[in-house]
Image (cartoon, grey):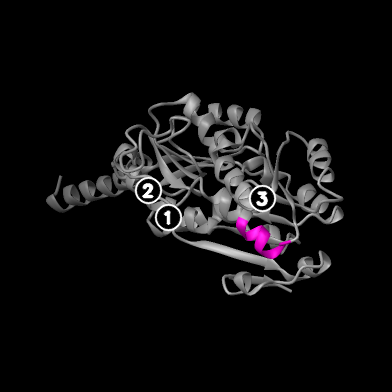
């Protein structure tokens, strides 16, 4: 064989081999990311937040279908549903799982103590044993705390600022999905109510029927206000909660400006999309070899307040200066 023909043959063989090598390298680089969202699959807010997370992840070099395969499951605010889909995700043996809400993280924690998990919207990761402490989580879980326990008192104070005539105040939550069974925020809620000489009530609900019974019980005299505790059940049932609060003329404070945009009175809480943007670099670092045990749990750094002026007018309320000077968004 002539030397030119030999070289050509070798080059041709190499060219044929290159796609196979490239394909093998690409397959080798493909990682698997599990995602467990507490929202229902059709919830536009849940979809938007997931898109925020995936966009930030793409900016860090991880693109679904190219070098990472993203498996998404939706919990729909149901503990039973979250346990089922958590088992599905763990069975896939992903490299890391991104988790939204306490209930979702708890369901995953039941299934694995080894697969790395990065959470958002968890208020108390120490109580249920997700982490040993905040600076050094110590296990397979880390993430971003939604709010400190003192937030319960903050909601009471803000609601009485905007609705000073209330004499009773209730807090509503589902003990199956709320942080600490609801106890995480209760201490500061009750302390604030006591300091303001308000009658405090606790509404533990598990269904739309119980939501209706609880909120309807607040109508009449003396005038009552409502604090809606953040948990995945409240997210899924926010429509009935806001509708019943309006129907019964109950001033209510929520934890997410989205409630106010949909007709709620006032909301104060951390910037939720910011959590999703900040969580993506943690997932990136774990995919590149770091351990969740060494990544500190982080607190919220951005908070938003929103007020619906139309709803305030319907309730016969005017916005005091103490509210207007701190409000980030006013819905007219």
Residue at image point 66% right, 38% down: 77
Q: Measured from the top left, where is residue 162 in percent x and y?
A: 69, 64
Q: Nearer the viewer, mark 3 or mark 2?
A: 3
Residue at numbered disc 1: 278
Q: Nearer the viewer, mark 1 or mark 3?
A: 3
Residue at numbered disc 2: 282
Span highlighted in magenta in the image: 157-164
Callout 1–callout 2 Cβ contact below 8 Å? yes
Q: Quadrant of the N terminus?
A: top left
Q: Measured from the top left, where is residue 28 in percent x and y?
A: 34, 39
Mark 3 surroundings: few (<14), some (14-19) or many (≥20) residues within 10 A: few
Gap in Å between the C-alphas at discs 1 and 2?
Answer: 7 Å
Q: Measured from the top left, where is residue 33 in percent x and y?
A: 45, 41
Snapshot quadrant of residue 202: top right
Task: Tell me the element at label 2.
Answer: helix
Q: Quadrant of the C terminus?
A: bottom right
Mark 2 surroundings: few (<14), some (14-19) or many (≥20) residues within 10 A: many
Which SS type dominates the magenta stretch? helix
Q: How many marks?
A: 3
Q: Is residue 310 above or below residue 226?
A: below
Q: Is residue 233 above or below residue 301?
A: above
Q: Is residue 255 visible?
A: no
Q: Farthest residue to the left: give it.
A: 3
Residue at numbered disc 3: 197
Mark 1 surroundings: few (<14), some (14-19) or many (≥20) residues within 10 A: some
Q: Is residue 279 above or below residue 136?
A: below
The answer to whether residue 316 is left or right of residue 283 is: right
Q: Is residue 244 part of the magenta span, yes or no?
A: no
Gap in Å between the C-alphas at discs 3 and 2?
Answer: 44 Å
């Amino acid at each position: 064989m002539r030397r030119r023909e030999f070289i050509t043959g070798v080059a041709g063989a190499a060219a044929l081999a290159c796609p196979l090598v490239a394909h093998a390298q690409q397959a080798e680089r493909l990682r698997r990311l599990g995602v467990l969202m507490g929202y229902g699959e059709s919830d536009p807010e849940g979809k938007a937040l997931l898109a925020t997370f995936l966009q930030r992840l793409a900016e860090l070099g991880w693109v679904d279908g190219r070098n990472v395969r993203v498996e998404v499951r939706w919990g729909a605010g149901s503990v039973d549903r979250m346990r089922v889909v958590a088992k599905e995700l763990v069975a896939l043996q992903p490299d890391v799982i991104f988790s939204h809400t306490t209930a979702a993280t708890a369901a995953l924690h039941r299934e694995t103590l080894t697969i790395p998990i990065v959470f958002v919207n968890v208020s108390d990761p120490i109580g249920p044993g997700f982490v040993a402490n905040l600076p050094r989580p110590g296990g397979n879980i880390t993430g971003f705390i939604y709010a400190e326990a003192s937030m319960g008192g903050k909601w009471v104070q803000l609601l009485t600022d905007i609705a000073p005539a209330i004499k009773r105040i209730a807090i509503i939550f589902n003990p199956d999905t709320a942080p600490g069974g609801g106890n995480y925020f209760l201490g500061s809620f009750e302390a604030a109510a006591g300091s303001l000489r308000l009658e405090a009530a606790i509404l533990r609900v598990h269904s739309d029927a119980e939501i209706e019974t609880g909120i309807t019980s607040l109508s009449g005299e003396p005038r009552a206000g409502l604090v809606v505790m953040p948990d995945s059940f409240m997210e899924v049932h926010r429509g009935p909660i806001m509708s019943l609060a309006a129907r019964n003329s109950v001033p209510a404070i929520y934890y997410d400006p989205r409630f106010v945009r949909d007709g709620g009175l006032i909301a104060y809480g951390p910037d939720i999309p910011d959590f999703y943007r900040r969580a993506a670099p943690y997932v990136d670092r774990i995919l590149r070899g770091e351990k969740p045990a060494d990544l500190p749990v982080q607190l919220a750094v951005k908070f938003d307040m929103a007020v619906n002026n139309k709803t305030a007018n319907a309730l016969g309320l005017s916005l005091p200066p103490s509210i207007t000077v701190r409000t980030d968004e006013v819905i007219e």
